[in-house]
Amino acid sequence: MAASHTVPAPASSPATPVRQTGWIADLAFAGLTVVLFVAVALATGVHTPWDGPIPLALFLGVLLLVRRRWPMTVLLLSVAAVFAYHLGHWSPAGWIWPVAAAYFTAAATSRVRWVVAVGVAQLVYSAVDARWIIDRNLVRYLIHTLGEGLLLAALVAVGLAYAALRRRGDLLREAEIPAPASVAVHRIVQEALANTLRHSGATAAQVTVGRHPRSVTVEVTDDGKGDPTGGGITDGNGLTGMRERVRALGGTLTAGPAPRGFAVRAEIPVAGSPE
């Protein structure tokens, strides 16, 4: 007997709080980028911050406001802006950290290989650009190049970890069902399929589980004639036992003929579910 399993997409919940939190984080990253870049420039002897540091900082900050929507575009434009800045200005600020937030965001996407490629290209150019330091201070050069490389590796690693946590959270929101309801769903499927095998003469069955904002539903349908006696009344293994189990959780269970056979359907409320 063939069996198919279908899990419909869960009901979506309002995303307004998530969007608000995202905008707050974007504004924070943008502001931090502007403040830190300008502060480092001033601390290292730049006397005319409007001639380079402030325009670059503002440009990088504005880009971060759309980093979630176009992460790779923001990364490429940010790196290009840093390249352009270094062509006309000397800066001890380095190459990677001014665009750290852009690297982090892009590393959390599926294009992490491209992120690494962009970062390696930037590191190579940085190492070549700073070659004049070798004759004056080899240790400083090594600190410069290795430090930039370690920072890039850390940003990519943190971005990947964040993406993994986000995926895990999405999976939990979509499918983690509280234990009592989960056990009930498992037993309903077990009992319904057992009755299908014993009584219906079906050749195919389908199990559908749905996760909704305040409930979980399970439906087992087959192409057989069903169990007209409701079997297993005394030992709790039939429809009566399933109804009692669902009723104890505040839910409902129906069983009867379906368009192409027989169907058992239960809806179980899930306390504390997100709206």
Image (cartoon, rainbow, N blue to C red):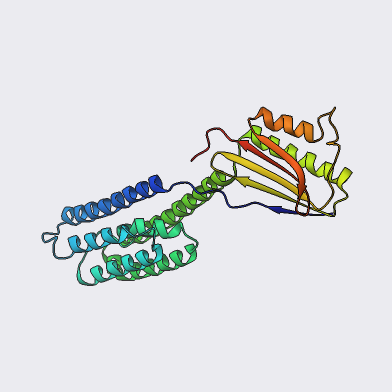
Where residue 194 sits, quadrant-wise, is top right
Identified at 14% across, 57% down, the residue is 45
On the image, the x and y values in percent for residue 184 come to 70, 35
- In the rendered view of the protein, which quadrant contains the N terminus? bottom right
Tell me if I can see residue 139 in this picture.
Answer: no
Which residue, as the protein is rendered here, is positioned at the far left?
A: 47
Q: Is residue 35 above or below residue 191?
A: below
Identified at 23% across, 59% down, the residue is 57
Closest to the observer, 157 or 132: 157
Identified at 79% across, 39% down, the residue is 191
Tell me if I can see residue 256 in this picture.
Answer: yes
On the image, the x and y values in percent for residue 170 come to 52, 48
Where residue 82 sits, quadrant-wise, is bottom left
The reply, left or right, for residue 57 in relation to residue 138 is: left
Identified at 64% across, 42% down, the residue is 217
Q: Is residue 223 above or below residue 178?
A: below
Where residue 231 sits, quadrant-wise, is top right
